[in-house]
Amino acid sequence: MLEFPVFSARGDRIRVLGVWFGVAVGAGATIGVGILRAPALVAGYLPDFSHYLLVWLAGAIYAFIDANSNAELATLVGRSGGPYVYVRAAFGSFPAFLVGWTDWLINVATIASVTVALYEFSANLAPAFLPRKEICVVGCLCVLGLVQILGLRPGSAFQIAIAAAKLIGLAALSTAVVVAFRHIPPPMASVKLSTEAQPFAYASALQVVLETFAGATSIAYFTSQTRTPGGSLPRSMFLSVLVISVVYLISVIGLYVCLGPDAMATSNVPVSDAAAIAFGANGKWIATVVIAISLLGLLNATVMFAPRILAALSQDGLGVSAAADFDQRGTPAVAVLLTLTCAIVLALSNSFEQLFLMTSLLGLVTTFASNLSLFVLRRRYSAETRPFAAFGYPLVPMLAVAVPAIVVAAAVVGTPVSSLCTLSFVLVAAPLFKWYSRRRAQRAAGSAAPAAEATANQQA
């Protein structure tokens, strides 16, 4: 396992997290807003059932391939922070800063958007919340922030509990819908795609599906706080992908059979509409409860790991100095406060929507850079002992690099203006990196001067 010097990581070595937390945070960070809307988007791109199902199976297979590469990277580098730390080890500070900056911003925007979505669904259950958006949003994030500041153990226990409730609820609801319609064959789509349109439709649908699976390896953000990372990290990642894949496939098949491609493509929340058809008046209420629990699990998982991206950046002098520290309870308290403050500002200003749309494509760029790091680190540290070695190297990990690259390229060809504008958003981080680099150099020079003076006095 490699070790990289950092400015400060106090409390970051409290190893209390196990396999079930890894599954809970992976499933929690993945199953949420995506599965609520993604089936409708995919049905719009690929109305035929065979194509629709094929792209979901492809997403599940890619999630296993991605977990395979991430398991080796996480156990080799041995430091919390996710893709940022892999890219830093492989390519240096500037590319890593771009990846870390983008990753953190995406997750801040996710926290803001999911909090607002949770408020809206909760208002359906309790209309008294409707005129109190600001209080509900701020209160929800403050409560979740407090859970994290209480310590790593309470935060992980809450995540395991809420993830279990979410998985059971969503799987039970989806299974009930399938059973209710077990005698009805998958409906045929009224719209058929031309041969020329299919490649771009597949690329667009796959982009949606890959984004829906993103987060399955979120245990990587907690590497240095995981017990026996060489064994528990790979198991957590693969189990997380397996659980997510099973729940997703049950859900998307049930929704397609119940609603049909035409109705689903125009549905805002297919889960809610399918439950209403299957169970009548109480269906939407049941679906709303399941959705609210799903969003809460996603929100808590993101609130847990997003500050650790900022902490990793700060430990290398590329963020707020105070955000680098972990307290004795294993929590980056300042990073939590800064992350939630930014999320609250975005949620209350509604500017998160534009930011989220702009940065969603960048998640694939982050995935591409992270998986590409494996090849560089394999060559550079060929003699290093690996607690877990990715299977099928180099062919299988090569797929983990090629798939996001192809999907991004197809997005640029299909929608060049919006895609290039989105990708250029990364360049916003360049001036910020220069400022941090200068400050880091000044701090290093300042700390070197007293040491040199002390050495000179000693010699005198």
Image (cartoon, rainbow, N blue to C red):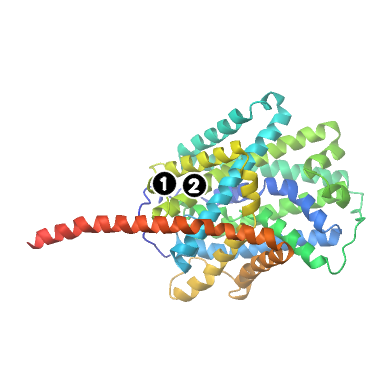
Determine the residue positioned at 48% across, 71% down: 377
Establish if 455 lies above or below 195.
above
How far across and how far down the image is residue 432, in percent?
A: 45, 55
Q: Residue at (74%, 60%) from the top-left corner?
A: 204
Q: Quadrant of residue 216?
A: bottom right
Query: In the rendered structure, which amino acid carries the disc numbered 2?
Result: Pro
Task: Single out the residue that lies furthest toward the top.
Answer: 128
Q: Which residue does the numbered mark 2 point to in the structure image? A: 307
Q: Nearer the viewer, residue 270 or 434?
A: 434
Q: Which residue is mark 1?
A: 323
- The percent coordinates of residue 374 (x first, y second) are 53, 69
The foreground one among 85 and 415 is 415
- For label 2, the SS is helix
The N terminus, quarter of image: bottom left
Could one spot residue 6 in this view of the protein?
no
Badge 2: residue crowd in 10 Å (few <14, some 14–19, many ≥20): many
Gap between marks 2 and 1 measured at Cα: 8 Å
Q: Residue at x 43, y 41 (%)?
A: 333
Q: Position of residue 399 (x, y in %)?
A: 64, 70
Measuring from the top left, give residue 220's x and y in whole percent.
Answer: 52, 56
Instruction: Name the foreground residue: 430 vs 36.
Output: 430
Q: Tell me if 254 is positioned left or right of 146 in this view.
A: right
Residue 265 vertical placement versus 394 (above, below): above
- Could you classify mark 1 by the number of other residues whose Cα lies within 10 Å: few (under 14), some (14-19), or many (20 or more)? many
Q: Is residue 108 left or right of residue 77?
A: right
Question: Quick check: marks 2 and 1 in contact, CB under 8 Å?
Answer: yes
Residue type of the residue flagged with mark 1:
Ala
Q: Which mark is drawn over residue 239? A: none
Q: Is residue 383 left or right of residue 401?
A: left
- Residue visible at 90% across and 61% down in the picture: 192
Q: State whether residue 199 appears in this view.
A: yes
